[in-house]
């Protein structure tokens, strides 16, 4: 900035701004900066959510929006009697209940493995992370081949150990577990990376001190490592839970929700009802209920974790 | 500084608005220097088929230079419902192209919901008579014509000549000698040896239209129906004893292990299955398998000889501002030249009788089988607005049958869901 000379001061005196005005101006600037993000959020997140709530009380058919009528709680009544909805809810719950703890543990184990200072460890970090950056659709298609009961890789390998052959995706009792296994394999690398960052934040001198005190590896893990990454653990548990409830691509690509609805999830049902069957009203009702369920679980989880960390 | 921010906002808004309005204009047809600009969507079939669409539209544009210009977009269709999803999404956002390519059985739903505009006024009555009856049936809803197809389709039983000879089996070569279900079952059992299955039914295509397209024929052949004559009711038809018996036959095929639920996509071509219930569009692909010596025979029957029908057809969207010009495109894509050419490329039977006369390969085996089926036994899937639900639920019931489930229970469920959907359109 140029130094303010006497002359410019005379010709162009600084405007007198009251603190109140300045505050208002600051407010304007900050909202101005937030506006692009807020507008996008409103248009693509909040508005659709409000619309979904509204549609769930109507009989909106995708191709005839002009004939939409208000039907009050009819969609929700139908939901209460829909066995397919209960089945989808059960399938989603099964996926979440297994994936969240197992994937978190696998990721932690992987992170501990690749956190060692060994030659070529970067290669393994990359290898474990590679499935994460691969498109889920491609991964799903690949695993459809791997899971082929007659000439797939999975049965060939299991055959060497003397197991199988398994039917995998074409058996109603195995399809969901096949998807769970593949999803953990695909997703664990992501949590591993976050854990790794946390692990590297734990100062070395703590481990050194523990070694001097004669602590073994297990005691170090329980008393130093786990407490050191407690916050990250909580974060990962919540994020994985929310991501797991949204299971869709795997059943969409690999099984189309079958066989016998054994891999139909809530989000799949929302898609199928809303797009394939064009029944937006009913689809919205499912989505709203799904939202409420996830919200309740998230609140409970937060509360539980908060109590634990305090 | 502040002015800069404001300008930036304005720019962002301007761009986003421009983006929106561009889409809309393009969708409903515009004019550029007197030349009508049209948009068209076609599904992504086999590569050669896509090339044909592009080439034919290029020729159309050359022929109509200065009057009509069509921009063709090829939309992936996938094994699922990707193409239908795209149409549904576009229909709600006023983003439909002027000319639409759609699968035959969906015409009823699109017509009932007002997505399509009737094209009777633009189609010459005499020309209409040249089309195969099944093609006009599939394009007609409520007495009005909505779509014209260039291709008909059919499913036949393909067989590996070498493997049949080894097993001492002679496949029927005339329609009156077509295999009954029992004979077909017997042949499949005889042909199943070790790693080679007697039959593949392309279960790798997933739970989608294929299962309904192929599976409905079993029901019809056993004197069953999917809906009543008025197409207003599924209960008592879709789950009638005849329909249940039909899917029980399919169940038996899978139970006796002559056919697998986890077949590979090319088991027949690679000699891992002796016979295949497959679409006639697979024929051009056989060229890649030099060792394959194949033959073709009729769809097996129970009480009535029936064969599948229906294929992609062209219609005009109701959102088009130039329906007359758009209808020209639909007619162009289904005129005799197009029909003959696409039939040669895809191996699909032609949609016009005059084209059959020109394609002499349909007079002798193996393609005679297709001609016999198209002209004598073809039956279209019901044109009903509830088709999306009916098709999906029937496909699920069919899959349940292949997995050895209780067929009656599954068809009861399918009938109930279909009837609820039909209620929606009874007003």
Image (tube, rainbow, N blue to C red):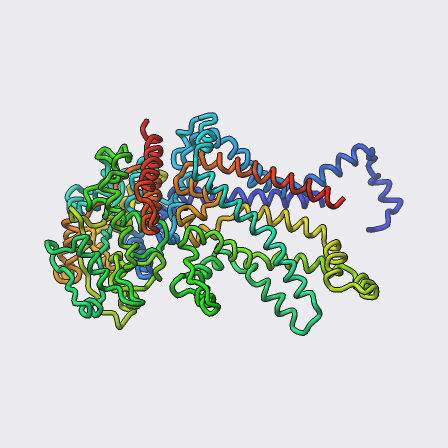
**Where residue A22 appears, x then y in whole percent?**
79, 36
Please provide percent x and percent y for residue B316.
31, 42
Q: List the single residue furthest toward the bottom.
A: A119
Residue under the point 76% across and 58% down: A224
Query: Residue B108, percent across and down?
Result: 29, 39
Relative placement, left or right, of B59 versus A57 is: left
Apparent side of residue B92 relative to residue A195 in the rendered image (left or right)? left
Q: Is residue B77 above or below residue A276?
A: below
Task: Count the marks.
Answer: 0
Residue B269 position by quadrant: bottom left
Asked whether the viewer can see residue B54, the reply is: no
In the displayed orientation, state which residue is furthest to the front. Answer: A162
B415 lies above or below A254: above
Q: Say which quadrant the C terminus of chain B sits in.
A: top left
| Residue name at image x 31 percent, y 50 percent | B211
From the viewer's side, name the closer residue of A162 and B364: A162
How far from the left and from the top, in percent, is residue B82? 40, 49
Q: Is A37 left or right of B408, judged from the image as shown?
A: right
Q: Which residue is depicted at the point 61% across and 68% down?
A: A124
Vertical relation: A200 (above or below) B382: below
Residue A290 visible in the current orientation: yes
């Amino acid at each position: 900035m140029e130094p303010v000379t006497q002359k410019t001061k005379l010709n162009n005196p600084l405007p007198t701004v009251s603190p109140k005005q300045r505050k208002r101006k600051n407010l304007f600037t900050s909202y101005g900066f937030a506006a692009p993000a807020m507008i996008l959020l409103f248009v693509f997140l909040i508005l659709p959510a409000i619309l979904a709530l509204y549609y769930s009380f109507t009989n909106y058919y995708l191709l005839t929006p002009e004939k939409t009528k208000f039907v009050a709680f009819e969609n929700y009544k139908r939901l209460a009697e829909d066995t397919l909805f209960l089945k989808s809810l059960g399938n989603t719950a099964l996926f979440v209940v297994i994936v969240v703890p197992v994937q978190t543990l696998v990721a932690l184990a992987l992170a501990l493995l690749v956190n060692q200072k060994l030659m070529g460890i970067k290669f393994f970090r990359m290898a474990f992370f590679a499935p994460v950056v691969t498109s889920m659709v491609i991964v799903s298609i690949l695993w459809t081949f791997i899971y082929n009961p007659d000439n797939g890789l999975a049965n060939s390998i299991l055959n060497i150990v003397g197991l199988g052959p398994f039917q995998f995706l074409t058996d109603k009792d195995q399809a969901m577990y096949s998807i769970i296994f593949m999803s953990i394999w695909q997703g664990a690398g992501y949590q591993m990376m976050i854990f790794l960052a946390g692990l590297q934040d734990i100062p070395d001198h703590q481990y050194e001190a523990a070694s001097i005190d004669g602590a073994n590896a297990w005691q170090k893990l329980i008393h130093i490592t786990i407490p050191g990454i407690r916050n990250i653990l909580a974060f990962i548990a919540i994020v994985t839970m929310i991501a797991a409830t949204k299971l869709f691509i795997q059943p969409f690509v690999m099984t189309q929700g079958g066989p016998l609805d054994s891999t139909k999830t809530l989000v799949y049902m929302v898609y199928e009802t809303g797009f394939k069957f064009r029944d937006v009203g009913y689809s919205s009702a499912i989505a709203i209920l799904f939202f409420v369920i996830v919200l309740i679980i998230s609140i409970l989880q937060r509360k539980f974790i908060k109590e634990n960390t305090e | 500084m502040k002015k800069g921010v404001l300008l930036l906002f304005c720019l962002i808004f301007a761009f986003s608005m421009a983006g929106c309005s561009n889409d809309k204009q393009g969708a409903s047809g515009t004019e550029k220097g007197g030349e009508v600009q049209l948009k068209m969507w076609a599904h992504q079939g086999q590569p050669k088929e896509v090339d044909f669409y592009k080439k034919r539209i290029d020729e159309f544009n050359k022929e109509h230079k200065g009057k009509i210009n069509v921009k063709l977009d090829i939309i992936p269709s996938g094994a699922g419902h990707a193409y239908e999803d795209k149409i549904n999404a576009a229909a709600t956002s006023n983003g439909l192209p002027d000319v639409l390519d759609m699968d035959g059985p969906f015409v009823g739903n699109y017509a009932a919901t007002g997505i399509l505009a009737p094209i009777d006024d633009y189609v010459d009555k005499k020309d209409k008579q040249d089309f195969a009856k099944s093609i006009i049936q599939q394009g007609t809803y409520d007495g009005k014509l909505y779509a014209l197809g260039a291709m008909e389709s059919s499913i036949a039983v393909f067989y590996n000549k070498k493997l049949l000879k080894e097993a001492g089996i002679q496949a029927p070569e005339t329609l009156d000698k077509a295999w009954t279900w029992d004979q077909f079952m017997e042949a499949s059992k005889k042909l199943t040896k070790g790693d080679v299955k007697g039959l593949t039914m392309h279960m790798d295509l997933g739970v989608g239209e294929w299962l309904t397209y192929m599976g409905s024929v079993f029901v019809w052949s056993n004197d069953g129906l999917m809906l009543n004559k008025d197409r207003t009711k599924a209960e008592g038809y879709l789950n009638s004893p005849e329909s249940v018996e039909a899917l029980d036959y399919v169940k038996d095929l899978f139970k006796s292990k002559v056919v697998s639920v986890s077949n590979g996509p090319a088991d027949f071509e690679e000699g891992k299955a002796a016979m295949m219930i497959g679409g006639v569009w697979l024929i051009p692909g056989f060229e890649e398998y030099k060792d394959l010596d194949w033959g073709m025979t009729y769809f097996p029957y129970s009480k009535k000889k029936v064969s599948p029908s229906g294929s992609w057809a062209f219609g005009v969207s109701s959102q088009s501002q130039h329906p007359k010009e758009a209808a020209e495109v639909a007619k162009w894509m289904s005129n005799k030249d197009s029909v003959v050419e696409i039939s040669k490329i895809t191996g699909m039977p032609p949609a016009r009788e005059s084209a059959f006369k020109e394609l002499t390969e349909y007079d002798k085996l193996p393609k005679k089988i297709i001609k016999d089926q198209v002209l004598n036994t073809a039956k279209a899937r019901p044109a009903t607005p509830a088709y999306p639900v009916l098709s999906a639920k029937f496909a699920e019931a069919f899959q349940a049958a292949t997995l050895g489930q209780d067929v009656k229970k599954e068809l009861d469920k399918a009938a109930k869901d279909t009837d609820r959907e039909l209620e929606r359109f009874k007003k």
